[in-house]
Image: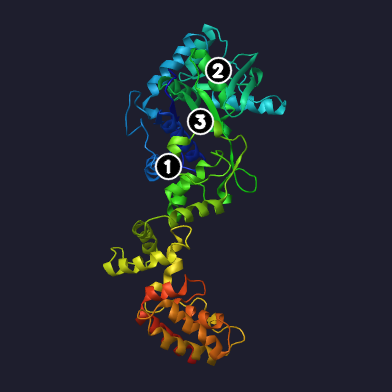
Amino acid sequence: MAQKVRVRYAPSPTGYQHIGGIRTALFDYFFAKASGGDFILRIEDTDQTRSFEGALEDIYDTFEWLGIDYDEGPKKDGPYAPYIQSQRVDIYKKYAKELVDKGHAYYCYCDSERLEKVRKEKEQNKEQQGYDRKCRDLSKEEEEDLKKKNPNPVIRLKVPLDGSTVFEDIIFGRIDFDNKTLQDFVLLKSDGFPTYHLASVVDDHLMEITHVLRGQEWLPSAANHMLLFKAFNWTPPVYCHLPLIMGEDGQKLSKRHGATQVIEFKNQGYLPEALINFVILLGWSFNDKDEVFSVEQLKKIFTIDKINKSPAAFNYSKLKWFNGLYIRNMDNEKLLNLIIPYYKQKSMISENVTEDEIQILRKIVPLIKERIEILADAPQISFFMFGELPEYKNWDMIIPKNVEKKTVINILNDAKEILYNLGSQKDEDLQHQLYELTAKHGVKAGAVFMPIRIALTGTNKSPDLFPVMNALGRDKVMFRLEKAVEKLKN
């Protein structure tokens, strides 16, 4: 029987969750689910200097928002707990010492001052950067002497001085590293905490991880990890380095391209299912035609053999398209509840929403559902539904080009008489009567409908006119048309 798939997402709490990390988490998650395997969340917080308050909670919040349910992790302990590396330091110390005892690693007593001196000398001599291995083959006497000066040495791996380190990557194939280009990297720091390399390898082995999916930028680290697995005489997991995520300008995705943190997309009003659908296609495709996938579908069909080698382009317009698609397919009541916070932010409704405000929002949802791409768009598109009169953003456009002000006043007065029957006559009949005003006043249709739209909504880009008028109700329509006429007269 094939070994059960076990994958892990191992973020560091050094910043808010970003698209690259979440892409890895989603690939891990759906691969595990589709394979009948386990998905583990492991927190790699051994770099205490870079960790900051709020980052760990952001990991948990992001998983909850996206609906990623891990099988083992900090809040769901399994047989390999704890899953937070800072709570596993004694384990790493034990394995680092084991490598020293077996002759695969050594204590290095060089301080930061000496290391900086070596760096500068190598730079001046145009030599390959890196540690000069001064402490690699110390005699017992030399080591005892150095230990008195520096009782807290680091532990470095003895990297082979010749030959090569080779491994197979699912995406990039055979990767061959010349050992002469590699450094005797640190395993255990002077404060007793492990480096990423040691902690990651030890945990992947102890937690029986079968596949490691991570970003292509980690490819250079693979040599270090292969050397560690060999030193421990452990079988390494299968590695799958994911293609880079680029901006549309061909440069690596960064802040200059727009939002990159998941919390930013969440706050702007992107839906988790839309973000998941979009992100899963950054370097993966099921076939040449399908691109809309539910979470349940992905749990069944996702395979790592369909991951592409080429960099993936992050297209913000495409993400908005996905989001709009999911919004349009959403239940109206669910959409109503999702947009409430955005109206509160704009102080358009009360903090404790009243029933009257809920009723207004219920009228708004059908008007905006086809027009919004993100939830934050909702207040901007429907501001005219609040208050007695809208803020007239385009008032100067209420008088169309080549049409006299008097004509517009007459059109609005005629529209008042027609729309007095709003709700008692069919919309189609009322619309036909409004169209008849074009012949009466000798103008085009736009010169009739645009002044009405601006009078009622304050903008020339509102949702369809008759649904808007029905949502406003006859009394508000009459009131606003009358105010528009007064404003034009004055």
Q: Earlier in the sequence, mark 2 or mark 3?
A: 3
Q: Is residue 271 left or right of residue 128?
A: left
At which x and y percent is residue 198? 48, 22
Instruction: Identify the amino acid type marked 3.
Output: Leu
Look at mark 2 in the image and give the residue it sits on.
227
Look at mark 3 in the image and give the residue it sits on.
213
Residue 441 sits above or below residue 68 on the image? below
Residue 425 sits above or below residue 319 on the image? below
What residue is drawn where x is 37% and y is 44%? Answer: 61
Q: Residues within 10 Å of mark 1 (few under 14, many from 20)?
A: some
Instruction: Identify the amino acid type marked 2.
Output: Leu
Quarter of the figure with residue 158:
top right
Helix, strand or loop status at disc 3: strand
Quarter of the figure with residue 97:
top left
At which x and y percent is residue 357? 31, 68
What residue is drawn where x is 61% and y is 39%? Answer: 311
Q: Is residue 308 left or right of residue 422?
A: right
Q: Report the front residue among 146 and 489.
A: 489
Q: Residues within 10 Å of mark 3 (few under 14, many from 20)?
A: many
The dot on residue 266 is: none
Instruction: Give the residue furthest to the top.
Output: 140
Helix, strand or loop status at disc 1: helix
Gap in Å between the C-alphas at discs 2 and 1?
38 Å
At which x and y percent is residue 315? 57, 49
Q: Earlier in the sequence, mark 3 or mark 1?
A: 3
Q: Which of marks 2 and 3 is in front?
A: 3
Q: Residues within 10 Å of mark 2 (few under 14, many from 20)?
A: many
Look at mark 1 in the image and give the residue it sits on.
295
Q: Report the front residue among 276 and 73.
A: 276
Quarter of the figure with residue 185:
top right
